[in-house]
Image (cartoon, coloured by chain):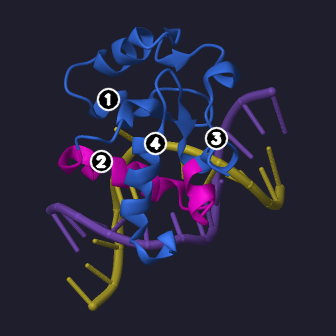
Chain colours: A blue, B yellow, C purple
DNA sequence: TTACTGACATATA
DNA sequence: ATATATGCCAGTA
């Protein structure tokens, strides 16, 4: 079955749901996995609508620099950071430390 | 309808 | 290395 049948957004949601505990990924990685490496913005936009998808771990999706750019869109202020820290990820000043260590690439992990 | 914005990334200067 | 410009698609004004 071809996942391509689904809409771009749904695929983004699926990948976001597949992100394992204590791992993070980047918009570009997801976009690339979906075949739209240059549509990273859409990934973030999809996350914006993730409010309808509770299973989507939007807080585990960060930009290529490991910077919590989307934290501003979360409820409070440091909710996203605390969630990541709660998973064992070290986050300082909205930036993930040891990003490579926590990075989770769908194209690699999911093949 | 067109124009602008947006949780990014890559290319070029 | 930093700064500026462009692309991607969808939503909102």
User: CA gap, disc 4 to disc 3?
Assistant: 11 Å
Number of numbered discs overlaid on the protein picture: 4
Provide the residue designation for mark 4.
Answer: A18
The residue mark sitting in front, 2 or 3, is 3
User: CA gap, disc 2 to disc 3?
Assistant: 21 Å
Provide the residue designation for mark 2.
Answer: A48
Instruction: Tell which of A57 and A67 is nearer to you.
Output: A57
User: CA gap, disc 2 to disc 4?
Assistant: 18 Å
Residue A95: percent from left, percent from top: 53, 18
Q: Answer whether labels 4 and 3 touch (C-beta < 8 Å).
A: no
User: CA gap, disc 2 to disc 1?
Assistant: 11 Å
The residue mark sitting in front, 2 or 4, is 4
Residue A5 disc label: none
The residue mark sitting in front, 1 or 4, is 4
Q: Residues within 10 Å of mark 4 (few under 14, many from 20)?
A: some
Q: Residues within 10 Å of mark 1 (few under 14, many from 20)?
A: few
Of callouts 1 and 3, which one flags the residue occurring earlier in the amino acid sequence? 1
Q: Residues within 10 Å of mark 3 (few under 14, many from 20)?
A: many
Residue A72 disc label: 1
Of callouts 2 and 4, which one flags the residue occurring earlier in the amino acid sequence? 4
Provide the residue designation for mark 3.
Answer: A105
Q: Chain of mark 4?
A: A
């Amino acid at each position: 079955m071809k996942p391509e049948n689904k809409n771009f957004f749904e695929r983004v949601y699926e990948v976001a749901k597949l992100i394992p505990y204590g791992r993070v990924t980047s918009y570009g990685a997801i976009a690339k996995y979906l075949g739209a490496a240059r549509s990273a913005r859409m990934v973030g936009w999809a996350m914006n609508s993730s409010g309808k998808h509770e299973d989507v771990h939007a807080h585990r999706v960060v930009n290529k620099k490991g910077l919590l750019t989307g934290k501003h869109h979360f409820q409070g202020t440091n909710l996203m950071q605390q969630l990541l820290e709660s998973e064992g990820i070290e986050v300082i000043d909205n930036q993930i430390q040891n990003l490579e260590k926590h990075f989770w690439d769908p194209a690699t992990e999911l093949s």
